[in-house]
Image (cartoon, rainbow, N blue to C red):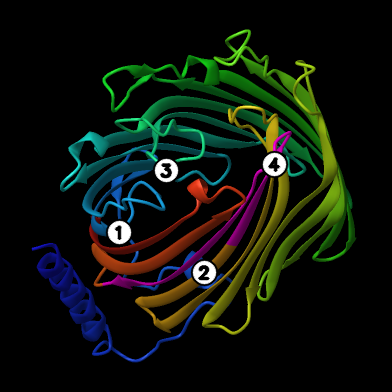
Amino acid sequence: MKFLKGGLLASVAVSALAVTFAASAQEQVNPDKAVTERTPEGYEPKGITVGSFRLYPKAEVSEEYNDNIYKSNTNEKDDYITKIAPGLQLRSNWNRHFLQFEASSEFGIYGDTSDNDYTDYNLRATGRADATEALKISGDARLQRLHEDRGGDDVATDAKEPVEYDKMTGVLGGTYKPNRFSVGLTGTVDDYNYDDNATIGGGTDNNDDRDRTETKGEVRFGYEIQNGYEAFIKSSLNDRNYDSRVDDGGVNRDSNGYNVQAGIAIDLDRLIRADLGVGWMEQSYDDPTLDDVDGYSADARVRWNITELTTLRAIASRTINETTTTGASSTIGTALGVGVDHELMRNLILNADAKYYNSDYQGISREDDKYTYSIGADYKLNRNFFGGIKLSHETRDSDNAVNEYDQNVIMVKVGGQF
């Protein structure tokens, strides 16, 4: 029955793609934007006027087949997952300043393993005040209800259900650029609150020792060398404070650190946008049993319009991340990724991505390499209805074989917007 259902999904996807090739020939495009940043004329949602705002409703339904939902290397379990994602966006129409409110949710419904069902939601408000031509002040407030699937790095292996948690985020920043020089200040607070979850044996996993508040402050100085090229240096301080004095293993995971980077920002709008930075980072832990961490840091993002119809994307980063793995103070995460978007027709975009992520656990002999590959297509039927398909594969290699897995996912989606 599962193979029959999978064949039906594949048939629907192939039929949808076939319809697109009967569409009209390629029309004039706007080369000033990346492929995924522009919406063809006649395909943009109109929205609903609400005073000086416009309201944009949207809903999406997707069906996934996942051949290894627990990311396990033994006793692999497959399932079909229906995801329903409604959302609203209220956006200002002002000539100056900007304000936007968002509300969205996602309901995940598993065909055979209902213990894995979840409900996520997101409430967000973002804004920008143009105090003067040179001074911009921005803010971002966000409340999220999220989950970690069984099989996640910090989820206990005996978990009966996903780990749910709340995340609150507040960001306040400003940029002042009176001439070639610029200065920016940003403050960020992230608060995490994890729920306990049931175990397969009938007990309860305590996740309170993961509750924490992460505070970060950053200052950035820039100098415009010439039009489209800016050299910069930025420095940030962080404080990671756990609600519990010690975790379930008796370890105090509080820490503080810094990251200093220098680099160049490129903004040649019709061709390339890039932000390239390298530097040094350190994180010091209050508990003497946890290893302090230092090393080079990196943060690079590139968007290159190879042609008017093809955009190349690339990312690279190296950061210090939290973990509750016994004996490890943190992980150093190294990420590399490349992707391409191609506008085959003005309402059909093809995409492909390849990503590599290395997790080097500090204080224990564990290192994971994760490889992710995907191909997909997004199709706009008209301004109100859209669809898509995506095939992805993920592999994790590890020093410990129990942490290795292979996972394949096929997803078909349809949606509406107004």
Q: Secondary structure at mark 4?
A: loop
* Kind of residue at badge 1: Asp
State yes or no: discs 3 and 2 in contact (Cβ < 8 Å): no
Say if mark 4 contacts mark 2, CB within 8 Å.
Answer: no
Which amino acid, by three-letter code, is at mark 2?
A: Asp
Q: Mark 1 or mark 3, which has the lower sequence index?
A: 1
- How far apart, in angstroms, are the residues tagged by discs 1 and 2? 20 Å
Marking on residue 91: 3
Foreground: disc 1 or disc 2:
1
Q: Which residue is mark 2?
A: 353
Q: Earlier in the sequence, mark 3 or mark 2?
A: 3
Which circle's residue, 4 or 1, is located before the other in the chain? 1
Query: Mark number for residue 365?
Result: 4
> Distance of mark 1 from mark 3, alpha carbons?
39 Å
Our reading of the magenta stretch's main secondary structure is: strand
Whether residue 376 is in magenta: the answer is: yes
Q: Position of residue 260 (x, y in %)?
A: 86, 40
Q: CA distance from mark 4 to mark 2?
A: 30 Å
**Residue beneath the point at 39% across and 40% down:** 52
Type of residue at label 4? Ser
In the image, which residues are magenta?
356-380
157 left or right of 210? left
Q: Would you place residue 203 above or below residue 165 in this image?
A: above
Residue located beneath label 1 in the image: 67
In the rendered image, residue 13, in percent from the top left (x then y), is placed at 22, 74
For marks 4 and 1, give the CA distance. 29 Å
